[in-house]
Image: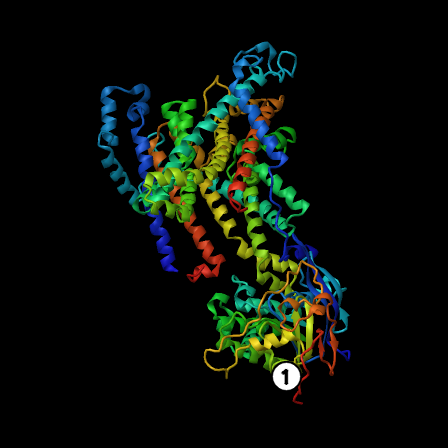
Amino acid sequence: MSSGPLLSVEGVTVDLPTRRGMLRAVESVDLALLPGRTLGIAGESGSGKTMLSRAILGLLPRRARLAGRVAFDGADLTRLDPEALRKLRGRSLAVVFQDPMTSLNPVLTIGRQITETLQEHLGLAGATARARAAELLAAVGIAEPEQRLRQYPHQLSGGMRQRAVIAIALSCEPKLLIADEPTTALDVTIQAQILDLLAREQRRRRMAMILITHDLGVLAGRTDEVAVMYAGRIVERAPTPVLFAGRRMPYTEALLAAIPKLDAAPHTPLQTVAGRPPDPTRRIFGCAFAPRCKYAVEHCRYEAPPLAGSGPGHLYACWLPLPAQHVPA
Amino acid sequence: MAVLDTAVDGAVAPRPQRRLSNVFWAAAAWIAIVVLAAAFANFLPIQSPTDMDMLARRMPPDAQHWLGTDGLGRDILSRLIFGARTSLTVGLLSPLIGLLFGAALGMLAGYFRGKFEALAMGGMDVLLAFPPLVLVLAITAYLGQSVLNLSMTIGFLSIPPFARVARATTLSLAQREFVTAARALGATHARILLRELLPNVLLPLAAFFLLAVAVTIVVEGALSFLGLGVPPPTSSWGSMIGEGRESLDIAPWLAFIPAGVLFLTVLAFNLVGDALRAITDPRENAL
Amino acid sequence: MLGYVGRRLLHLFPVLLAVTLLTFLIASLLPGDLAVAILGDQATPEKVAALRGQMGLDQPVAWRYLHWLGDVIHGELGRSFRTGETVLATIGARLPVSLELMIMAELAGLLIGVPLGILCAVRQGGSLDRLLTGSAFGMLSVPAFLWAILLIYLFAVELHLLPATGWVPFEEDALGNLKSFVLPALTLALGEWPVLMRVLRSDMIATLQEDYIAMAKAKGLRPARILLVHALKPSSLTLVTVSGINIGRLIGGAIIVETIFALPGIGRLLVGAIYTRDFIILQGVVLFVAVGFVLLNFAVDMLYAVLDPRIRHGRA
């Protein structure tokens, strides 16, 4: 086990050829994640956060062009041969997708979908595998696990399905779990349960986790560090409390403002971020957020601000960062 | 396995819009040639298709017989051309019957729904569950083998598929705004059916018609091959192939020349019908 | 589940009835006197009248139909006036031949079509895919009897490997029996596989874009397993339908193929019955064929439920 980050994303850029030209989905992303820590990635749809997760997993579409380096547990994933990569996936590197109804195969039983992973990576078979699968289902909070093993995805509720997906992800004790919008497709009441489940399992297994979401509220209190993405780039990155209390980039401010507050007065209109994300097939000059930014000046439209830091571990890309605020220790 | 990567492509670039390809035009040209040759057969400088010359049987091509002679000394080329007449007559007449009656039935069923639709479609199901060749054979056996009988029977049997296509198209069209608008303007049923629905239903039906022609040519060919189709001495591609079967060991071309022509014609109709269908119905799945 | 089964059965009954009625009408209303045809040279007015009375031919059509229907319900399909054999016995003698042909043909078609369909779906858009799809289209334009001629020419005439016609019972000569089915089954299969391949390819292309396939990849499963277990099963519904319909058609006796290869199956039985005006056989066999077709559709519906558990539990 090497010391240093478990996952290191260096200068990753993803381009997709489309009919309308080359689409730059991700631009020069740098990230690092230590073992056992949680990183949150926040951004609107189209910000490139899903493409980034696919790039890390090596699941990009065939036509995509990847530049940069992804180092995981000592190995460079971008240079690994397909067979070695396949062995890592599901075992050391696990993923939970957004919609459990579509990420589970409708014609296979839940049990099969768990045991096949156990069989592939851990060599478990038969009764042993089924027993372990039942244990996993119980661990994620599914009652009567033996029965559930024989059932099909459509026979479970949405929350249970996602729990099953998490069980599958955790089955081989991964070192890193990537959760891409794990609660977006679920009822609000279930969302907190699932997030708590993830956090709990993570602590127990000392697993590193990347939590991807469009909802910053989900990341508060559940992550160690947050990276905010916009138009394929990281525009702010900081330890979580620092970001929430002392955000510097106006986009982050807008995202934070969009979170409905429990203690707001009734009928307070929900804040939105006006405008739309830029067209990713056009080259962007200047700051990508400038058209929607209420603080933007001419300079912002001409030159893209670099991701640079002030305080420890706090990076942001803005020419006119918002004033630094006092951060509670 | 690298091949799987291709498959898991989420962002596959969509297929380019298919223009009418060279293959399509070649097929259309072939159909034109065959139709013209069949239509003007009597005026072409070819031998008679029925003159037998027992001294010149199974001859290879020469100046007199451009494609040689068959087992009874008849000129192959001319039999091919007159055979085209038979195949095309049945091939065009039967689907026409199917189109006229089937489209009418299907449109009415799809438009009026209710008991009429249930009855009509039920009738179609019955006809479809019936072994088709049995009906054709029964009619030709009891009423005699002739081009007309054959065409009518096959035509009758092709009504259900046309009815189905017409009904399906009508069902989807009847929900659309232009029909509702017409009704709101006080148009009668007849007017809506004829002026609004029919033009739109016609195009998918046309594509289906061409495919039906291909199938009919095959059916007629198969029946003639077995000697159960058009009676001799009328030549038909099927009967030529059937006769050629006798001499496969010594003169295989007697069977394969008409076979080739039959295949090319069926292929041509399939290609043209398919291209038309691709234009009118963009779902790639439809067979 | 029972409701599903029941509903399907109810739907098909009236169709069955109508088919038999249609057959009966055709057989009865056609020109020519059956009794005269049967008696042939020995026809005298007295004998004809006697035979007609005996066969019930002088009764109205409706009466005869109901009478026949009543017999059918009791399992009495009648007895051929030509051969004296019961319809059931005749069918029983011919059925194994048709079944063997049917099964071999469909299996062969699937054996060719399924792997090619999977291959094309995985390499979609590539040159292999285009070549195979184009060939499939071309082959669809080749009628069964043309395949028959081609195969006979290749294997029987040129290579002398297989018999051109003729059939030996299995009990007599197992190898000979199988050999006599190769060309006929292949003839049918060559017409089947393009359809099966296209259908599977199309469904599989759609399935491979589903999230659960990406998930299977993310779990690090072997590509072969992803294809055959995760992708094939959900893609096979249309394939099963088409296979089922094709087998159902073949139940009607692959008349053309049986005639060309001189196989004593149901198809030739039907043709023979038409030409000898043995309408008892004709009705019985058509009924049998229609029932078979209907039952097969039913079996296909049941197979759906096995393949897709969502249908089993009432949600699609």
A42 sits left or right of B194 in the view: right
Q: Quadrant of the C terminus of chain A?
A: bottom right
Q: Is residue C243 above or below residue A211?
A: above
Residue C12 in view (yes/no) = yes
Query: On the image, which quarter does residue A313 sit in?
Result: bottom right
Q: Tell me if residue C78 can be seen.
A: no
Q: Is residue B232 left or right of residue C141?
A: left
Q: Residue furthest bottom?
A: A329
B130 vs B7, nearest the viewer: B7
**Of the residues shown, which amino acid type is indicated by label 1?**
Ala
Work out whether residue A73 or residue A215 is closer to the camera in this orientation and state it: A215
Q: Which residue is drawn at 56% across and 26% down?
A: B32
Instruction: Please name the residue shown 68% across and 72% down the image.
Output: A235
Residue matched to label 1 = A245
> Outermost residue toward the front?
A298
Question: Where residue C103 sits in the image (x, y, percent)?
Answer: 51, 44
> Looking at the image, is A141 positioned above or below residue B182?
below
Q: Where is residue A108? Give x, y as percent.
A: 53, 63
Residue B178 position within the rendered picture, expressed as x and y whole percent measured from the top left: 41, 46
Q: Which of A148 and A269 is in front in this view?
A: A269
Chain of the residue on which disc 1 is drawn: A
Question: How many marks overall?
Answer: 1
Tell me where residue A72 sits by quadrant: bottom right
Q: Position of residue C44 (x, y in %)?
A: 26, 19
Q: Residues within 10 Å of mark 1 (few under 14, many from 20)?
A: some
Q: Is residue B64 above or below residue C203?
A: above
- What is the quadrant of the N terminus of chain A in the image? bottom right
